[in-house]
Image (cartoon, coloured by chain):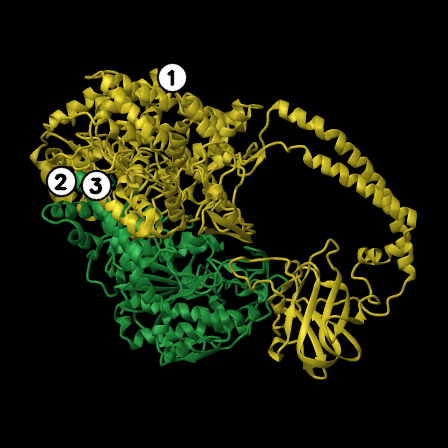
Amino acid sequence: MIQLLVFLTATASADPAGIAFFEQKIRPVLVEHCYACHSASAKKLKGNLYLDSKAGWEKGGDHGEPAILPGDPENSLLIRTIRHSEPDLEMPPKKPKLPDAVIADLVTWVKMGAPDPRDGAVIEAKRADKSWWSLQPLNQDFAHGTIDGFVEAKLAEQKLALNPPADPRALMRRITYDLTGLPPSLTEVEAFVAACQADRNAAIEALVDRLLASPRYGERWGRHWLDVVRFGESNGFERNFIIDDLWPFRDYVIRSFNEDKPFDQFIIEHLAGDVIGKDRPETEVGSAFLVAGPYDDVGNQDVVAQKNIRAATLDDMITATSGAFLGLTINCARCHHHKFDPIPTEDYYRIRAVFEGVTHGRRVVASKEQRHAHEAATRPLREQIAKLTAERDALNGTIEARAKEALAERTFPRPKIDPQGTEDRFQTVRAKQVRFVIQATTDLRGGGRLTEFEAWSGGRNVALAANGAKADGAKGAVAEDFPDAYGPQFCIDGQPGEQWFIGSPAILTITFAQEEAIDRIVFRNAKGKDVQDKSQGATPCEYEIQVSSDGKTWKTVASGEDREPWSPAHGIQRVRRAVTENEESAKLAEVDKRIAALQSQLNQVPALPMVWAGNYAQPKEPTYVHKGGDPMKPQDAVIPASLSVLDQVTQPYTLPAQAPEGERRLALARWIASSDNPLTARVLVNRVWQYHFGTGIVDTPSDFGFLGGKPTHPELLDFLAGRLIANGWKLKALHREILLSRTYLQSAAYREDGAKLDKDARLLWRFPPRRLSAEEIRDTLLTVGGKLTLEPMGGRGFRLYKFTQNNVSTYFPLDVHGPETYRRAVYHQNARASVVDILNDFDLPDIAFAAPKRANTTTPLQALTMMNHSFTTDMATALAARLETPDPVGSAYRLAFQREASDNEREVGGRLIAEHGTRAFCRALLNANELIYLD
Amino acid sequence: MTANPIDLARREFLARMNTGMTGVALSRLLAGELTAAPAREPHFAPKAKQVLQIFCPGAASHVDLWDHKPLLEKYHGTPLPGGQTEVTFQGKNGNLMKSPWPFAPAGKSGKMISTMLPHMAGHVDDIAFVHSMTSRTNTHGPGCVNMNSCFTRDGFPSAGSWISYGLGTLNENLPTYVAVQDLRGEPPNGKANWSNGFLPARFQGITMSAQQQLRNLSRPSGISEREELATRDFLNFIDEEHARRHPGNDELRARMAAYELAARMQMTAPEVSDLSREPGTIHEFYGTNDANKLKAAYARNCLLARRLLEQGVRFVSLYCASRASAVDGLLNWDAHKTLKADYERHCPIFDQPTAALLTDLKQRGMLNDVLVIWCTEFGRMPTHQDGTSGRDHNPDAFTTWMMGAGVKGGVSHGATDDFGRRSAVDIATVYDFHATVLHLLGLDHEKLTYYHNGANRRLTDVHGHVLQSILA
């Protein structure tokens, strides 16, 4: 914990009488009534006000004025509050007023000039104010001109120095993984080692330039960024449905990194790509950032819940924006002023005002040319279809008019079916089986359900499962994790409630325990007595009851033909056939055929690309501050504006309350991405540093506030930020500068002196060794097995789970990863709350939140997965197939570790191969530390 | 590197151990802190060492199971005073609806409990009911996650993860925190319920159940035991060579130890989940062979839960029912339309096996160490849902309970109003509930913290008071 210590020196010495008055009358009152909330010993400091020192009340608290104005009790905040004269300004809070005599003493004391001997005290700031380091303008004046200068100076303070240069082989692996996330090939390593012998610096520069130009660079560094912006491809929460059209954003990120797009532009595209990039899909897609987070989409009828859900949805956008670009935890100011940073709650709602018009969803993201071409290709077809449809409707109209007349003349002797129970009686018949052939249900479009079906033999329902009967029938819905759901067995369980979802063919077949003499059946579709609502679904209303003794020949014993139709529409449907002329039928068939043909042509025109890029609408209402974060307690309205936390260093702006939606986002984006905003550049270069060295100069990459870490090298941070801006916000130049530093190129060797003083090498006395990330591990296994498919890049993601949806979604991890998954892991469709093998074992985060820094854990479960999942065995088999026969051990080491095996390794490995074959040997190599740790 | 205390402790430990010990001996020592964390000292003397959580997802109705409301019977069919225009989760509500089943007094305490739970009635004298629970959401998924993590949003660590983080493991050969899923599938919001959130991955809940063993536990088919051993020996050889070339990198040794631990887990986990080691009388007692497949499956999971606790698993989450389906109340306790039919399906699945598990724990003396908590995400309305004979969601009132280590039996904390519409007396929150759980485990809920994205996070957020009235 970092604490700001402010030492205050002794100041004026007051008169002894005044001090005596303070000690007798005032100090005891302050201790008893105020210190609990307003002192260094307070459990929770309230209002940022200290009353345990003179300096404390002189400085004042959140009100921003001194708590006491010596000589002026009427205007002293302290006196005003203890008098309880103003609402919401009553101290001590929720307690009776102090006795009048005590108040009079305090007034007297203030009149005396508030003599207070408590000076020279130490105030321990428990929070940051606007003098906080990260809120200051970028330093421009440096003691050093290179990265190494800053690093070596810090090391020298500890009497440490950089390690010697790393050996070329280790360096090759380090740089290649760092920039591409993949291992180098042995040939590449050897060429590099040779080139280093000729000219080390030139060889390294050439390597760095080659890798920065490789498309693999964007795949690796784009993945980092996706962590930062909490990119996930399902909506989370209860339904957690999968999102299949957010991948264009992932490809956009990769492409932007590969193109070395200036990062200020990249930020603006994230917040307002649709505003600046109309008809330019490659720009427009950037604003999918706003809707790449989780949100609750459950259909909630409760108004309070709806408002809370909307508030949480916007909170995700606010949190993501402030964390990713500014390294500020503005989200902590949702319910109150930020507890630790100088962020008033209004700042939170200012950003909310910016996003107020954003909703989750998909829309067409296409260029003007694409839209025109699509319109040109589809319009003639749609027009023809419309014309034919009108023709068909007209014909249907005449037929239906006749049908209506015919229906009026027809009589139906029996009442319509009753979902609560419909009975059909017939002459007693002996049967082994009865079947319910459903020709129509109360939903004329099809589909329906049934809760019970009974067949009676005297007083006994012989169709009951309890009486040995069995039910068969196709199901219209499936729950993969619960196979019994929706099955026909529910029709004969004697219970209302659960239903058979009628499938196709719509036939329920009941087989009795033995041949029975039956004379009536009853069917019901009711989830309870007298319960009728839409959710129970449609009920069969047109049917035949058939019986059989051998399951081959069926005899119809009853039907719903003579029942009153369920509805006028149903009645028309029933008589329609009889009143339709042959030529009308032919005409209808022909029109249908032509429409179908046109429709199929229409379907062949590629649809305009849809992207989960959000929808934008002008907010209907102003944005209010919510008291305590409760949307039911709106307070003052706020307008879209820059954040006051940075108003002393950036150019502030305010927009009118009715500012157009897109303008709000663009203004915020430009303000964030401006070069006078010191946080944006600092936060970004720190991320780049972190991904190169494992830990950032600030080790809390999305929190540059009071609770975050303090920079180990504050000057270096500003130096790099300045370089970034000078380079036009391009990252590749920054990478180059870092990678070519001696700091980066030093060896990772362990040294006692360094480890003793700085175990984690935050000062960089060595290059910090690291384990590969989850994606690198999977990509490495595929590479070593010779199975990784690099092209085509991008497109729809692959899945390491089976996705099922039955009201809500369930993600089942796959036991076998087929060849379609042999792509780089960045292309995995990362759904929220899905846990997949290898990736999640090795700390791929669940993207409920941004993951600006990955965890790095070692668990036995990783070992279980790597030893036992079939993916490892598959890759071991694949690697085994690549080994050369005279020297399998040697070739395996070259492929896996890009080095020669030692004699000892050859011998021991050879013995394993001799006894158990090459696969066993390869399986061990794929589990080895050497494969996944870098120097 | 994050400066979390466990990692620091581990690093210090490793630094001390770096000299003079290699290979297997060192790995053995390391192994203990890998599964979750080394056993850690609580903040003060604990009453309980382990937790059994029984979770009935779908919002199990308080007024039909645990919270007897005589006035609901008296005013059945009349409007809820002041509630005529209320719109809740699925829409409008009808009149007050009494429970389809009578309540009856049970035990010495005479606690009124639904006659649908005849076996559970036998335990009321050991149970402390919390009748005045409230939730912050009326939606199942966020509600379940809230009951587990005190936040409605995914991404926060569940109580089981916090407790694993706070107390560490009791048996390094098994996961510290096990989530036992129902045969019918995952609860609402699925895996988020046992997520480690932002805590390191080793604090996550691991799923295993009688129907589904621990994932990737068995060695691949076609690989003999001899081959497996030879492969591991060779792996150990290359890792040893590599570690020798890389002094000062603790992680390498730690990963080698993790492989040993995994091998031991491969031995231990199947033993623990081998229910055939239990006598027939026990099987019968739990109902593992019941004709009702769902009941039998849940009973087997109850038995597994006991065996896991016996082996020192710190936190076992046992689910009875699962998620929402196309039919309300089919797969879980979400009885929107047909309360009677739904609960006549769910109660028999739950009642006997749960009661048997509690009796078994008690008879074995395990309740001296095990705290049992029963949870659901929120309650149900005292009225029927418009046009149905079921009840809509009610986040303003529900019942949870605790029993076992450190808990007073036969008591009730708080109460709902006359009809069970809202919690009214000594209102309790999910924060209070978990503050109490942590307290019983010897942890101060305000001190168990972890830094994440700008805040020192707690299980209980910035709330929570220990429910003193139910402490023994």
Please name the residue that numbered disc 2 is placed on. A22
B346 vs B222: above or below: below
Residue located beneath label 1 in the image: A728
Callout 3: 10 Å neighbours few (<14), some, many (20+)?
some
Quarter assignment of residue A742: top left
Nearer to us in this view, A607 or A539 = A607
For mark 2, does the 10 Å Cα neighbourhood hold few (<14), some (14 to 19), or many (20 or more) residues? many
Q: Which amino acid does label 2 sit on?
A: Phe
Label 1 or label 2, whichever comes before in sequence order: 2
Query: Mark 3 — on which chain does it sit?
Result: B
Q: Is residue A427 left or right of residue A859?
A: right
In whole angstroms, how far apart are the C-alphas of marks 1 and 2? 61 Å
In the rendering, at what x and y percent does residue A676 appear? 35, 19
Quadrant in which the C terminus of chain A is drawn:
top left
Which quadrant of the figure has residue B306? Answer: bottom left
**Compared to A848, does B150 lie above or below?**
below
Mark 1, secondary structure of its residue? loop
Callouts 3 and 2 close, C-beta under 8 Å? no
Q: Which amino acid does label 1 sit on?
A: Gly
Q: Which chain corresponds to the colour yellow? A: A
Q: Which of marks 3 and 2 is in front?
A: 3
Whole-Å distance between the Cαs marked 3 and 1?
A: 44 Å
Residue B32: where, in percent of width, then height? 21, 55
Residue occupying image coordinates x 37% and y 45%: A876
Q: In this view of the protein, which residue sits in the foreground, A498 or A589?
A: A589
Tag 3 near tag 1, CB within 8 Å: no
Occupied quadrant, residue A745 = top left
Residue farthest along the front direction in this orientation: A886
Output the chain of dot 2.
Answer: A
Give the residue at mark 3: B242
Q: From the viewer's perspective, tell me whether residue B86 is left or right of residue B233.
A: right
Q: Which amino acid does label 3 sit on?
A: His
